[in-house]
Amino acid sequence: MNPLTPPTDPLILYGHTFTSRLLLGTARYPSPAVLEAAVQCARPAMVTASLRRQGINATNAGESFWELLKRLNVPVLPNTAGCHSVQEAVTTAQMAREVFGTPWIKLEVIGDDYTLQPDTLNLVEAASLLIKDGFLVLPYTTDDLVLCQRLVDVGCQAVMPWAAPIGTGRGPQNPYALQTLRERLPVPLLVDAGLGLPSHACQVMEWGFDGVLLNTAVALSQDPVAMASAFANAVAAGRAAHRAGAMAPQQAAQPSTPVLGTPFWHHDKA
Amino acid sequence: MNVIINQQTTTLPAHATVQDALATLSARPPFAVAVNTRFVPNTQYASHTLHEGDRMEVIAPVTGG
């Protein structure tokens, strides 16, 4: 059990209960050992993984990472990274289901190779096909309200809007759009992509998001293990703050120390 | 016949199956296969016949975000 997530406040996705609200990617770490240590430190709900071509004369292709995944003993969330069409995404998901033995899929249909922005025109169709095929789809999407609603309409029980383009670490670029999603959509929302600092993760959790998925912010930090821990704490802190109910911002200053009995004070004006 | 496996042209006997192709690769599990962008379940490797110009993908788990 993750002590950062109280047992009374689990993350629930598609009826499955998780004790962490942090999902962690496995790419770009300095070494497999650092990846393993970071995951063990952060204790994420899931770790993401992908599928790529095996060498034509395959030797140990994928084998060492496969062994590491088994050692981590954390649920795997395969992704369809690099897919540019509905067919590519559906086929990749089906291959992932067979290899990883899981119905979970992080659905990515990329529309632009520079920004890695989701293909908003084809994402919904891909999600619909996969939902009908029994997948538990976590779609990576933009912060467009209508698009997110359409994903919910076709059966997605959670949506993962970006904070900023993948790997940029820029943090939430459109707070208004993200907060609007939170206000309007009743399903679990996880911010996926573009987070760079634990404070970014804390911020979106304070807004009421249900979790975050990040990779580069940990993997490319100077100390990925410490950063993984920092993010885990930030996610928990943001969630606790959201549940505690923050004070409403005030227009005027209001002293926190009682005014009555202030020494040396006197009334100058009649 | 020529079949393109992971973007590389490979010569296989006529009527070769996915299983035959995998044997030439010495493919090591875990992996999954698609032919012409369609998923081929592992239960069909021995029965899925390849044709001239087929494009076959053999993919394995890697790190990802």
Image (cartoon, helix red, strand yellow):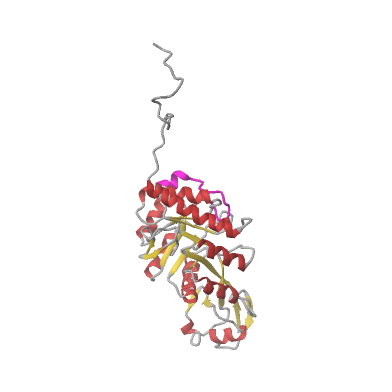
User: Considering only vertical position in the picture, is A231 above or below B6?
Assistant: above
Identify the residue shown where x is 43% and y is 17%: A266
Residue B47: % across, % down:
48, 87
Residue A67: % across, % down:
56, 75
Let me know if residue A67 appears in the view: yes
Please give the count of numbered marks on the rendered protein: 0
Is A154 magenta? The answer is: no
Q: Quadrant of residue A215?
A: bottom right
Residue A257: % across, % down:
43, 31
Residue A25: % across, % down:
54, 62
User: Considering only vertical position in the picture, is A53 above or below A27?
Assistant: below
What is the chief secondary structure element of the magenta stretch?
A: loop
User: Considering only vertical position in the picture, is B28 above or below A142?
Assistant: below
Identify the residue shown where x is 52% and y is 55%: A231
Q: Quadrant of residue B2?
A: bottom right
- Residue in front for this viewpoint, A214 or A232: A232
- Residue in front for this viewpoint, A138 or A19: A19
Q: Quadrant of the N terminus of chain B?
A: bottom right
Q: Quadrant of the C terminus of chain B?
A: bottom right
Q: Which residues are magenta?
A: A164-179
Farthest residue to the top: give it: A270
Question: Is residue B54 rendered to the left or right of residue A259?
Answer: right
- Residue in front for this viewpoint, B1 or A131: A131
Let me know if residue A25 appears in the view: no
Identify the residue shown where x is 43% and y is 24%: A262
